[in-house]
Image (tube, grey):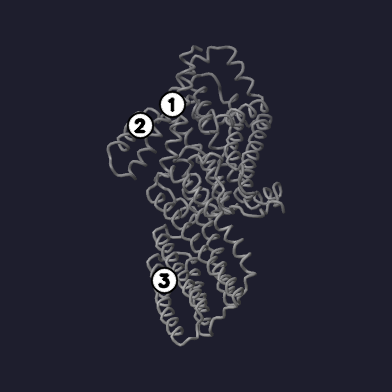
Amino acid sequence: MSIANILSLLGGLALFLHGMQMMSSGLEAAAGNRMKSILEKLTANRILGVLVGAAITAVIQSSSATTVMVVGFVNSGMMTLTQAVWIIMGANIGTTITGQLIALDVGALAPFFAFAGVVMMLFIKNQQINHYGSILAGLGVLFIGMDMMSTAMIPLRDMPAFVNLMTQFSNPILGILAGAVFTAIIQSSSASVGILQALANSGVVGLHSAVFVLFGQNIGTCITAVLAAIGTSRSAKRTTIIHLMFNLIGTTIFTTVCLVGPMLGLSLVDFMISLTPANPAAQIANMHTLFNIVTTLVLLPLGDYLVKAAMHILPDRPQDQEEGMHLAYLIPVNANQDRTIGLSAIYINQIRQELDRMLDMAKENVSTAFQAVLDRDPSLIAKEEEVEDYIDFLNKEISRFISHVIVQETNTQDSATVSGYFKITGNIERIGDHAVNICGYSDILKKKDVHFSDEARTEIAQMRDVCQEALDALGQAVTDPVGWLTQVSALEQKIDDMTSTFRQNQLERMRRGVCSDEGCILFSEMLTDFERIGDHVLNIAQERSNAPTE
């Protein structure tokens, strides 16, 4: 095999993998956060879940990418482990479409796909069409790479050493091991199956030698999801275990059939060859499709047992409960935040959950602050400051996460949503600051023995109640953004009106001489903090109303 052939082989593999990446990125940019709503509606039913997994994988030509997406969804709480099972099963079926397209010689149209996609990307101003162009161009590039690999491998059939090596793979253990290792290295079963088909088309290997390599390739593709699960939750790790169990069980079933069948006069391999005797690539594609469809049909009724097995293999541990200040939801999909399908939906959901957690802390501090003033209890300041430190920590970490992901975001709507979340975290942090200010007044009240009148205490209690009502409204799920924003705006206006009224009442108390100088100053400062809390509540509501319906 000449240097030119080797370079052509490597170039073809590079184009093949880059084509898959283009398709995945195009779908991510086109779908963005809508992937979440699609999956939520369809994965409750196992049949629909399988179909969704198959459809997504068929579009992006990579079960690894779909499984990584599922790991991220489970990790962020968007999907249950049971729902993940159906998507994984479908992904294994969907990944076979690449092999079938290769067998049908769709690659002859590859230059047209690539050209049409590039035209859509460069000459059409509509951004959504640009994303679809990326998907189409990626498909074309993928098949151009496949054709380059097939051509480069033709000389291998005349190399006795290489042909002898291929015959060794008829040994089940060696074949499965070779397929698993090679696929794990390039992290794509579609690519490794495509290379196997290229070898078959070049006359280097037949189905009898390739079948066990094919089974091993299904196992090797799990490595991508395993890598993606590093640093994620236990549930996300269980998702990769289910993926691995699916392919191990399928490999066991089909290896047994292929070994025992000939002894009984029934050869599955010979039968698959007889279906398309003149098309070696189709033989491999058909076996690959049969493997995944049959395994899915066998395991479909057993999905709940796969979940239980995964939980038994990787049970919950007490030490997994984090203590101290930590991010509960913002866990990167993988170490490098690589682009992967569904990433927008994953991190938008993670940020929203973390913001809800941060808002609950701020709400708790506001309630504590007003109670400390009413009770003249400065002992609550220590607790208040501890929670405020946590809020500051979350603000810093959420802002850092957002600044990282927004650079990579290609979907315009999702980019705007993430920008809105950046503003929300700052406003929540400011609510926490005002709560600390209010709580601090309790220390002055105690030290200087300042007492508010009953009328002033009643007004302070009313401030507390309306603040809690406004913050509770912020925590509601937003299904009707316009109506919800109107509700919160009315509460903010109520806070403004109360501030104005209470200031007038304070002046009247001063004229009557029932309010000390120190008490007047503290009450006035508290009104300022009270009004500012309302302003930040409205800012948060305005940003949330522009985000996708939750």
Marks 2/3: CA–CA distance: 54 Å
Under circle 2, the secondary element is helix
Tell me the element at label 3.
Answer: helix
Which one is in front in this view, the residue at disc 1 or the one at disc 3?
Answer: 3
Return the disc, 2 or 1, that comes first in the chain's sequence: 2
Look at the numbered discs 1 and 3 and tell me whether their residues touch, using CB distance below 8 Å. no
Q: Report the residue marked by disc 2.
A: 114
The label number, if any, that marks residue 492 in the structure image: 3
Of the pair 261 and 494, the residue shown nearer to us:
494
Q: Which residue is mark 1?
A: 145
Q: Quadrant of residue 138?
A: top left
Q: Please give the count of numbered marks on the rendered protein.
A: 3
Choose the circle earlier in sequence order: 1 or 3: 1
Residue ID at (43%, 32%): 19
Residue occupying the point 60% across, 25% down: 208
N-term mark: 2 or 3: 2
